[in-house]
Image (spheres, rainbow, N blue to C red):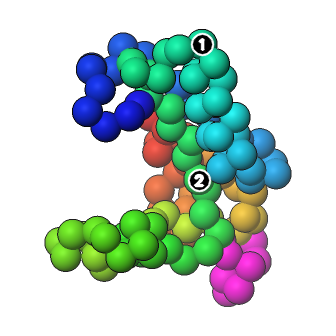
């Protein structure tokens, strides 16, 4: 959905699979929406189930407002996480993030 365009009439949520290729899935869906000339009224969202620490400043490449600059993205068990019982792929089954939010709750 390009900035400045008319109201969103539809939204597409693209949930990636075990490969965690959220950026590829997002780009593919944006391309498909564009091929059908629906980009002016379609919002495409592809949640990323992070396994690397990421702050608002990291996400926005330093352009986030000061109010949110310390905010942290939810994290699904990075490889250096001290609790090996939490699987980095747990989000697929509704599993919880390190912070306690569950992936199905996030989607809802």
Q: Which residues are magenta?
A: 77-85
Q: Is residue 95 magenta?
A: no
The mark found on residue 36 in the picture is 1
Is residue 35 shown left or right of residue 99? right
Residue 61 against residue 49 in the figure, above or below: below
Residue denoted by label 2? 48
In terms of secondary structure, where does tag 2 sit?
A: loop
The answer to whether residue 44 is seen in the rendering is: yes
Which picture quadrant has residue 57? bottom left
In the image, residue 77 lies at what x, y percent?
65, 71
Q: Nearer the viewer, residue 21 or 38?
A: 38
The mark found on residue 4 in the picture is none
Tell me how far mark 2 sits from mark 1, CA to CA: 25 Å
Which picture quadrant has residue 65? bottom left
Q: Nearer the viewer, residue 66 or 51?
A: 66
Is residue 47 shown left or right of residue 43? right
Contact between marks 2 and 1 (CB within 8 A): the answer is no
| 2 or 1: mark nearer the eye | 1
> Residue placed farthest to the right in the image?
19
Q: Nearer the viewer, residue 83 or 2?
A: 2
Residue 81 against residue 13 in the figure, above or below: below
């Amino acid at each position: 959905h390009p900035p400045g365009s008319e109201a969103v009439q539809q939204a597409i949520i693209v949930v990636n699979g075990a490969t965690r290729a959220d950026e590829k899935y997002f780009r593919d869906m944006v391309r498909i929406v564009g091929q059908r000339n629906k980009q002016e009224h379609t919002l495409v969202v592809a949640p990323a189930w992070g396994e690397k620490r990421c702050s608002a400043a990291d996400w926005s490449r330093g352009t986030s407002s000061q109010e949110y600059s310390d905010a942290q993205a939810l994290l699904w068990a990075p490889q250096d996480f001290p609790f090996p019982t939490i699987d980095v792929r747990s989000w697929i089954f509704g599993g919880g993030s390190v912070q306690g939010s569950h992936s199905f709750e996030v989607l809802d």
